Image (cartoon, grey):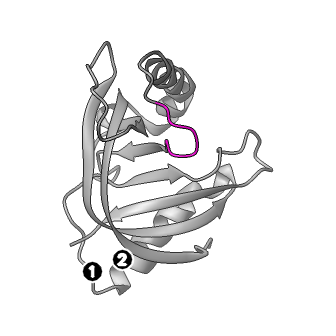
Amino acid sequence: MIEPKSITTMEVNLKIIYVRFRGSYSDFRKNSRKMFKELFDFGTKNDLIVPDETKVLTMYDDNPFITADKNLRTSVAMTVPNEANVIEDGNVCLSRISGKFGVGHFELSPKEYGDAWKYMYDKWLLKNPEQSRDAVPFELYVTDPPKSFKGHSQTDIYIPIN
């Protein structure tokens, strides 16, 4: 099983824009490039992208063990400056992520994402005194996701905790 380089806890307060998808994770993966393009086009057009500061993430709104595949909500998102005036348009929505999170810092290949999530929930959260909180978990891409199955990237997995 994959293990993180480290796990930290942190308070988060991020202003984000996002595009949501409803359907299975495999259908989401087929559509995610188009969704990220829409998000980046909106961010570029509205001067919301700050080099070396803007972060990109994927949010998982539903538990796949409870929610039917066709109803799973998954969103691609990017951080925007707190002072930015954002007017929602088309599929792009505005929100905020805040609270305390356990953060697993991973070096992952595309095939290892599921195992990393499993580690954070099954190994870390269940054996930790921290309690899960009703908020959206997400993965934040520290480096660009790999373009092939042989590549690796640095990805942080955020688990909401009390």
Q: Main secondary structure of the magenta part?
A: loop
The residue range painted magenta reads: 49-54
Residue 10 x/y as whole percent: 35, 70
- Identify the residue at horizontal 29%, vertical 37% (top origin): 83
Residues at marks 1 and 2 touching, judged by CB atoms closer than 8 Å: yes
Residue drawn where x is 64% and y is 50% of the image: 143
For the point 25% across and 44% down, the residue is 96
* Type of amino acid at the residue the image marks with label 1: Glu
Can residue 22 be spotted in the picture?
Answer: no
Kindly indicate the quadrant of the structure image that contains residue 134.
Answer: bottom left
To which residue does mark 1 refer? 130
Position of 23 relative to 110 (above/below):
above
What label does residue 125 carry, if any? 2
Res. 24 in view = yes
**Circle 1 Cα neighbour tier, 10 Å, few/some/many (<14 / 14–19 / ≥20):** some
* Residue at (46, 44) in percent of width and height: 57
